[in-house]
Image: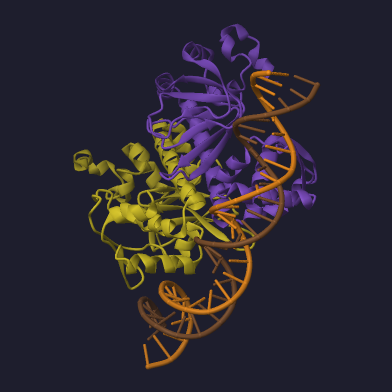
Chain colours: A purple, B yellow, C orange, D brown
Amino acid sequence: MTSRLDIHNSDIPVLCRACEARHRGVCGALNPQQLKELAKTSTRKALDSGIELVSEAEPAESYANILSGVVKLTKTMADGRQQIVGLQFAPDFIGRPFRDENMIRAEAATDVHVCAFPKRALDRMIAQSPELGHRLHLQALNELDEARDWMLTLGRKTAAEKVASFLHLIARHVDPEIEAKGTVVFDLPLTRADIADFLGLTIETVSRQITKLRTEGVIAVENNRHVTVFSLERLEDRANL
Amino acid sequence: MTSRLDIHNSDIPVLCRACEARHRGVCGALNPQQLKELAKTSTRKALDSGIELVSEAEPAESYANILSGVVKLTKTMADGRQQIVGLQFAPDFIGRPFRDENMIRAEAATDVHVCAFPKRALDRMIAQSPELGHRLHLQALNELDEARDWMLTLGRKTAAEKVASFLHLIARHVDPEIEAKGTVVFDLPLTRADIADFLGLTIETVSRQITKLRTEGVIAVENNRHVTVFSLERLEDRANL
DNA sequence: CGCTATGTTGAGTTTAGTCAAAGGTTGTGG
DNA sequence: CCACAACCTTTGACTAAACTCAACATAGCG
């Protein structure tokens, strides 16, 4: 389907030709000319898990599109307590338009590939292209919806419900089409510590709740990271969704 | 300062002339012609505390600007557990552009005045005016920042820190200019039940923490609602900001 | 003035956190 | 290829924070 649009690939920068962000991501708003201009200053990067993309304190100088992997957005208190306030997947856009200070840290949760470009270059293009501004607006609204959904989880759910909600979130992301009774298999993109930071719990509590779901036959776990959800429906019940 | 812009007030619809939303709110993006068109379909409403502006289930048919008062955005679980996911003040915009389903309930937390207009009328104008789209984008990004700040509070702060954070939020909103050592006096826009729903706590815990702040001389409270914060700095310490 | 809402306080329970130890997994260098 | 180290995860016993239930106090309203 989308290949129809790519007949004149010669117009499209090499870097962008196979890029998901050009279809579902923000770059989809750009014409070949704009894409070419942006591609001049963009660089692909492969980042190991744990590498910081955006610092909590310093003003950001670049934006990025995620090509693969998972990025976590975190907030940290002076005494070290941490909260993950968002997870981003390909082809999400990373960055805070219209402001330099971010007040948020972005870190590779898994090994990640991104396409990074200078803040200035994109800011210039936003001013020129309403369609690009609109795509960024949509992403912001989407992140806002997700953040508010998660606030309910953080504020009002029990530890058991929180862990089920998290697994449900990942399962849904791995396979958005899955029907309620279907089985989903995936590798967790987060360590227990990250899951705890995402859910506002401790590592130990997360571990205990995962064990409970395992012994009760809702999920299976191999090698800590590899998870099988036998029935999304059962997981939803546990999450009180 | 802004009165300079109002010399040709005859162009401005009567309804809009004294409206704060025309300066700091989204209507500031509209020219007199657009303002006139929008004013044709807009109506001012006075809503008592507790009245619902937007339903969690049904698609919204109108947007609104808050003229005065406080609106709470809430999410509710099937068993009745509730979480306030945002507070909005004048001249904030209420509504979810580019989507009908809201998945959120908006309710007057205090008596409220709003200027409401049909979703369609504004959607049409968004398509025409990039500046209007931009203002809505900025508000969405601002709400996203606030939501993520609050996620840290919900997930990682103690009850004492949560209550101090809430009082700090309100105090800052009442007087954004106040210096650290200054005294701030205000009426709480929320009941204890609402505060509990905002903080992910129970009424009793909120009450106990307020009592503690009172007995320790950080705040004074009269008639349950009227609060004096003696030193914003001390409150920030309690909130771990 | 009494009634209903809302808010406070206390006693006991529950949930999740803390601290400590042991079990697994992964990756490295011999 | 194996052994070891580093890290991550699980499990258990105990503790602390917040919740529940219940009684009482206060404020606002008719």
In the rendered image, the residue lying farthest to the top is A10
Residue B183 spot, x, y in % from top left:
24, 58
**Is residue A202 positioned above or below A88 on the image?**
below
Residue A46 spot, x, y in % from top left:
57, 20
Residue at (60% x, 6% y) in the render: A10
* Residue A93 visible: yes
In this rendering, would A218 be left or right of B84? right
Frontmost residue, A132 versus B180: B180
**Is residue A116 positioned above or below A206 on the image?**
above
Residue at (46% x, 13% y) in the render: A41
Q: Quadrant of the N terminus of chain A?
A: top right
Which quarter of the picture shows residue B4?
top left
Frontmost residue, D20 versus B60: D20
**Is residue A138 positioned above or below B50 on the image?**
above
Frontmost residue, B85 versus B11: B85
Residue at (27% x, 50% y) in the render: B18
* Residue B51 visible: no
Residue A118 spot, x, y in % from top left:
43, 19
**Is residue C21 positioned above or below A113 on the image?**
below
In this rendering, would A53 be left or right of A233? left
